[in-house]
Image: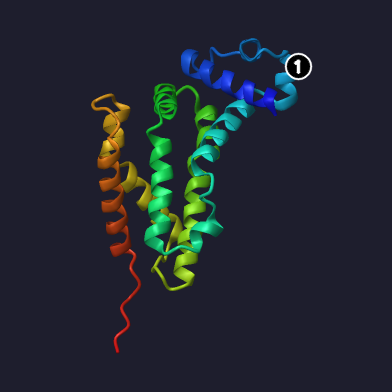
Amino acid sequence: MEKRKAILEAAGRLFLEHGFERTTMDAVAAAAGVSKLTVYSHFQDKEGLFRALVARKCDRYFKGRDLERLGALPPKEALTRLANGFLGLMYHPDVLSLYRLLIGGASQQVSRNRAFHDTGPRPTIESLARLLAGFHARGLLRVGDPQRAAEHLLAMLQGCMHQRVLLNVEPPPAARALKEHIEDVVAVFLRAYAPPVVQR
């Protein structure tokens, strides 16, 4: 496990410093202090290494936010916790740098960007959709299309603020501003997907 961790940390530094294409498995092995054979024993190829790196970053920020635990909470608390983890990930300096790298090479590196999407954003959307479907089944929310609702929530959380930070127009938001943003987004989402009021 220590060697795997060293390889992932070395790869993360090199990808951000030199880009995906210019980073070689030889360079990763040297930076991690292991043999090239050891790198390949853990990861089939560079794309597999990249996928594992993205998955590791996502796991770190969503640890303890599994569906079973979140699904047992009231929707407001569950979505607030998920939002904090999601934006903590989105505004992490390494993730911002990675997004800039991906956008810069989007037209040339389609397979790399697809690997990123399939490992990070897509599973996040699917997990959130399952959480929302569970709330719908229990009558706590009215979510006819959980996939679309999940995309609505994540898009609102990122909003224009994330775009401005990506473009280096402004720095990442301070903790208080981020807290207020999450509260506003969750409130709007809960109003939009509130269950019908039963008339008595």
> What is the quadrant of residue 74 in the picture?
bottom left
Q: Who's the residue at 47% across and 18% down the image?
A: 16
Q: Badge 1 is on which residue?
A: 37
Q: What's the amino acid at mark 1?
A: Leu
Residue 130 percent coordinates (x, y): 51, 58
> What is the quadrant of residue 172 in the picture?
top left
Q: Nearer the viewer, residue 189 or 93?
A: 93
Density class for disc 1 (Cα within 10 Å; few <14, some 14-19, many ≥20) is few
Q: Is residue 53 above or below residue 176?
A: above
Colour logic: rainbow
Residue 43 seen in the current view: no
Q: Who's the residue at 42% across and 53% down the image?
A: 150
Total marks drawn?
1
Q: Secondary structure at mark 1?
A: helix
Q: Quadrant of the image for the C terminus? A: bottom left
Q: Who's the residue at 39% across and 58% down the image?
A: 77
> What is the quadrant of residue 34 in the picture?
top right
Residue 19 percent coordinates (x, y): 49, 16
Q: Quadrant of the image for the N terminus? A: top right
Residue 70 percent coordinates (x, y): 49, 57
Residue 165 seen in the current view: yes
Residue 184 percent coordinates (x, y): 26, 52
Q: Is residue 18 above or below residue 200?
A: above
Q: Who's the residue at 47% across and 14% down the image?
A: 17
Identify the residue at the far front of this view. 176
Q: Is residue 174 above or below residue 69?
A: above
- Using residue 12 as the reference point, say whether residue 48 is left or right of it: right
Q: Is residue 164 above or below residue 46?
A: below
- Using residue 181 as the reference point, say whether residue 154 is left or right of it: right
